[in-house]
Image (spheres, coloured by chain):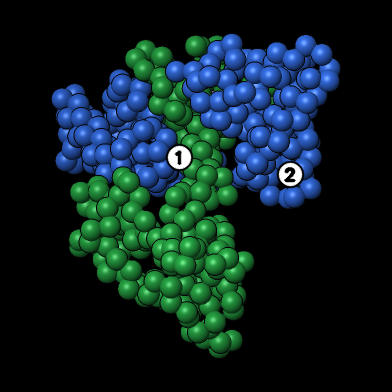
Chain colours: A blue, B green
């Protein structure tokens, strides 16, 4: 659903002499600087580095006759603003990699806290879906051989069942249990009307997984 | 609209290892993303906007389910867009615009009197269209209250009359420009503003509470002004 190209972008792409192009570029920059800076600040806390990133992003957007912006006009990716956020963010990540920096973002799925919580969420998924699949038990130092076999079978069955889910459901589970995202964030990302819809959908998917495990003779009760 | 066409000129992004959480691969099973298949910016943008449908959406979701870096990206982009649309800096919601207008008028001493009649100031607590103010209302500080804040004052407490039992509330405190100073969530009907949030004497502030009811409906108090003596 491409929207009409913003005027300043159209001007920029259709300028046929240097002066017009410069003027159009100035307009583009004036129009979108706040958005670009906003994107950068999410990834770069340090002000000076942020300004370096800003310069880098502008340079990349302008090079080769604004090739990237032409990419938008050719494909049409929904709102220009959304597309620009994606591209500006990628360029900023690129800048950080080039300049040997680390992403300083927090609040995204890469946040350290999330990584640490990941195991907890995974365990919760296992508990919710499998009821008895216990990762800690899998790591027992001296598990009975039968036990171990039993558990790894259940784990295998769960993995299999997850793989067979529709991809949107798999994404839902991953965002929730792997990345540890809040239901509200998931709702925004996946276009659920409210977080309650997220909970309901999660509940349904987990029920489905449980049913499937039972159907395969994986008993919920130990 | 594909996933295989990388954004040329962004080798850094495209050569990226797909996230640091590869080891936790239960959900992803044995599947690992093929680097060449990262979502391109067009697909990412369309997914974030909810414009992808059918097979294209399923393909994108299948990749997202196994690729931490593309997932990070859609979540981050969504958050940026949400931030832009709720941050007054960018697109000030009408409520705050109206409120800020009142503050500005008062601040620059513009007469509210015109043609000898008192023009009603722009209402501050305007209903936003998609929300209702039915059961939720502010208790303290009262609208346009002047709050005494000596150097030894107790922390400021914001209180409201709640919606139905079991509701969750998001409380927002903004400065006169509509910039969010602080925001928090609670199940209670009052909350203490942390001491490190600076409320300056003479300053005007706004606060509002959004409630999320157990039925998924949301209510808001609308923005309310108070100032600090
Ligand atoms: Zn990817």
Depth order, front residue of A157/A52: A52
> Which secondary structure lies at badge 2?
helix
Disc 2 crowd, CA 10 A, few/some/many (<14, 14-19, 20+): some
Q: Residue B203: where, in percent of width, then height? A: 57, 72
Compared across the picture, whether A62 is left or right of A179 comes to right
Who's the residue at 40% across and 60% down the image?
B123
Who's the residue at 33% across and 57% down the image?
B220
**Chain identity of mark 2:** A
**Chain identity of mark 1:** A
Q: Residue A167: where, in percent of width, then height? A: 35, 22
Depth order, front residue of B31/B63: B63
Q: Residue B186: where, in percent of width, then height? A: 35, 63
Compared across the picture, whether A45 is left or right of A160 comes to right
Work out whether A107 lies above or below B153.
above
For the residues carrying marks 1 and 2, which lies nearer the camera in this image?
Answer: 2
Disc 1 crowd, CA 10 A, few/some/many (<14, 14-19, 20+): many
Depth order, front residue of A18/A176: A18
Q: Is mark 2 within 8 Å of ligand 1?
A: no
Give the number of callouts. Answer: 2
Estimate the spatial distance between the alpha carbons at disc 1 and disc 2, rounded to whole Å: 27 Å
Whether residue B229 can be seen here: yes
Residues marked 1 and 2 touching at CB (< 8 Å)? no
Q: Residue A78: where, in percent of width, then height? A: 49, 22
Disc 2 target residue: A50
Who's the residue at 27% across and 69% down the image?
B161
Disc 1 target residue: A179
């Amino acid at each position: 659903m491409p929207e009409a190209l913003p005027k300043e972008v159209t001007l920029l792409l259709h300028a046929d002499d240097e002066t017009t192009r410069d003027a159009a570029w100035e307009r583009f920059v004036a129009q979108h600087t706040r958005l670009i800076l906003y994107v950068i600040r999410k990834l770069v806390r340090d002000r000076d580095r942020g300004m370096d990133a800003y310069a880098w992003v502008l340079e990349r957007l302008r090079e080769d006759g604004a090739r990237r912006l032409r990419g938008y006009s050719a494909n049409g990716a929904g709102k220009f603003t959304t597309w620009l956020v994606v591209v500006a963010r990628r360029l900023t990540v690129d800048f950080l990699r080039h300049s040997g920096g680390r992403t300083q973002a927090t609040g995204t799925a890469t946040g350290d806290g999330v990584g640490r919580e990941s195991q907890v969420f995974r365990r919760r998924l296992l508990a919710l879906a499998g009821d008895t699949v216990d990762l800690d038990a899998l790591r027992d130092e001296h598990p009975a051989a039968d036990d171990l076999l039993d558990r790894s079978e259940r784990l295998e069955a769960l993995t299999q069942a997850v793989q067979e889910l529709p991809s949107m459901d798999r994404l839902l589970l991953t965002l929730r249990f792997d990345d540890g995202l809040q239901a509200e964030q998931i709702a925004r990302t996946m276009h659920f009307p409210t977080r309650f819809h997220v909970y309901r959908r999660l509940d349904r998917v987990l029920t489905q997984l449980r049913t499937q495990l039972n159907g395969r003779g994986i008993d919920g009760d130990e | 609209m594909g996933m295989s066409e990388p954004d040329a000129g962004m080798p850094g992004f495209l050569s990226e290892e797909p996230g640091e959480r590869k080891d936790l691969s239960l959900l992803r099973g044995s599947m690992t993303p093929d680097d060449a298949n990262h979502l391109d910016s067009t697909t990412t943008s369309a997914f974030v906007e909810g414009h992808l449908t059918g097979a294209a959406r399923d393909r994108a979701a299948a990749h997202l389910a196994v690729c931490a870096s593309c997932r990070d990206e859609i979540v981050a982009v969504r958050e940026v867009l949400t931030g832009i649309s709720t941050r007054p800096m960018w697109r000030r919601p009408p409520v705050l615009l109206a409120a800020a207008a009142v503050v500005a008028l008062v601040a620059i001493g513009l007469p509210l009197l015109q043609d000898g009649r008192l023009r009603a100031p722009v209402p501050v607590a305007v209903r936003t269209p998609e929300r209702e103010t039915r059961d939720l209302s502010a208790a303290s500080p009262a609208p346009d209250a002047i709050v005494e804040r000596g150097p030894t004052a107790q922390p400021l407490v914001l209180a409201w009359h709640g919606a139905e039992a079991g509701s969750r509330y998001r409380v927002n405190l903004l400065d006169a420009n509509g910039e969010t100073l602080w925001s928090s969530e609670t199940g209670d009907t009052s909350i203490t503003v942390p001491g490190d949030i600076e409320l300056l004497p003479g300053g005007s502030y706004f606060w509002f509470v959004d409630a999320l009811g157990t039925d998924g409906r949301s209510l808001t108090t609308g923005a309310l002004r108070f100032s600090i003596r």
